[in-house]
Amino acid sequence: MKFDESTLYNINSKLNGKRYPLYDLALWKNGLAFKKINFSNDGVPVIKIAELNNGISGNTSYTRQIFSDDVHLKKEDLLFSWSGNPQTSIDIFKFQLQEGWLNQHIFKVTPNAEIVDRDYFYFLMKYLKPWFTQIAINKQTTGLGHVTIADIKRMSVLLPSLTMQKKIVDILKPIDDKIQINASINNNLAA
């Protein structure tokens, strides 16, 4: 398979492994455009990029409507926000709220467990944030930029074996867990 030669899409690494299109490593489900739904004062929150960055607030929308399971969010789902201000909105998240409905401009990402460890994929996506940000900046209009499925299909990464992925996760996950705990403590102190 011929891969895009651009350094923005053909991501090099010092790791040994097989090159894959980023798109092939996961299922990518875009959220819904919630234009024709019945909003309510309670129910299940509609998760936008603002909720991923700041949590539930007075600006969060709710609905009692039911949608398909592929846009229903539960704790620890991986989400990739692909549209907005490139420096602040383009990112990967582990969903930390009880539940929600996935809004547009966010992909629910389900890694293919046969070839990529879920936690490794999360760290890989965090690593790729500068590339995603540059892609979004290149497409920026009226202050907003985006990373499309076409971009994700063009991107390729070197993927080490599952055994090596798990070894890398064993090093990174405890560090990331401490960072998350510190962030939670700082948020609680600031509140």
Image (cartoon, rainbow, N blue to C red):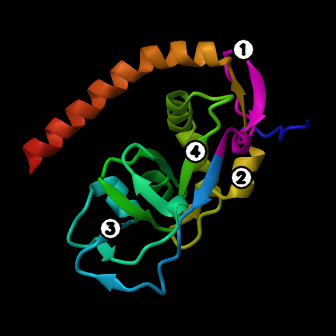
In the picture of the structure, the residue carrying the numbered disc 1 is 16
Task: Give coordinates of residue 188: x percent, y percent.
Answer: 11, 44
Kindly indicate whether the residue at mark 2 contacts the one at mark 3 (C-beta within 8 angstroms). Answer: no
In the picture of the structure, the residue carrying the numbered disc 2 is 151
The circle on residue 154 is none
Query: In terms of sequence position, does the residue under pointer 4 or pointer 1 come before the other?
Result: 1
In the picture of the structure, the residue carrying the numbered disc 4 is 110
- Which residue type does callout 3 highlight? Pro
Instruction: Please say if 85 is above or below 191.
Output: below
Circle nearer the viewer, 2 or 4: 4
Task: Give coordinates of residue 122: x percent, y percent.
Answer: 51, 35
Q: Is residue 187 magenta?
A: no
Query: In terms of sequence position, does the residue under pointer 1 or pointer 3 come before the other?
Result: 1
Quadrant where the N terminus sits is top right
In the picture of the structure, the residue carrying the numbered disc 3 is 45
Q: Is residue 13 magenta?
A: yes
Give the class, few, some or many, for how many residues have Cα within 10 Å of label 1's Cα (few <14, many ≥20).
few
Circle nearer the viewer, 1 or 3: 3
Q: Secondary structure at mark 2?
A: helix
Query: In terms of sequence position, does the residue under pointer 3 or pointer 2 come before the other?
Result: 3
Q: Which residues are magenta?
A: 8-26
Residue at 52% x, 67% y is 68
- Which residue type does callout 1 highlight? Asn
- Which residue type does callout 2 highlight? Asp
Task: Give coordinates of residue 65: x percent, y percent.
Answer: 40, 78
Kindly indicate whether the residue at mark 3 contacts the one at mark 4 (C-beta within 8 angstroms). Answer: no
Residues at marks 4 and 1, CA–CA distance in whole angstroms: 24 Å
Q: Secondary structure at mark 4?
A: strand
Residues at marks 2 and 4, CA–CA distance in whole angstroms: 18 Å
- Which residue type does callout 4 highlight? Thr
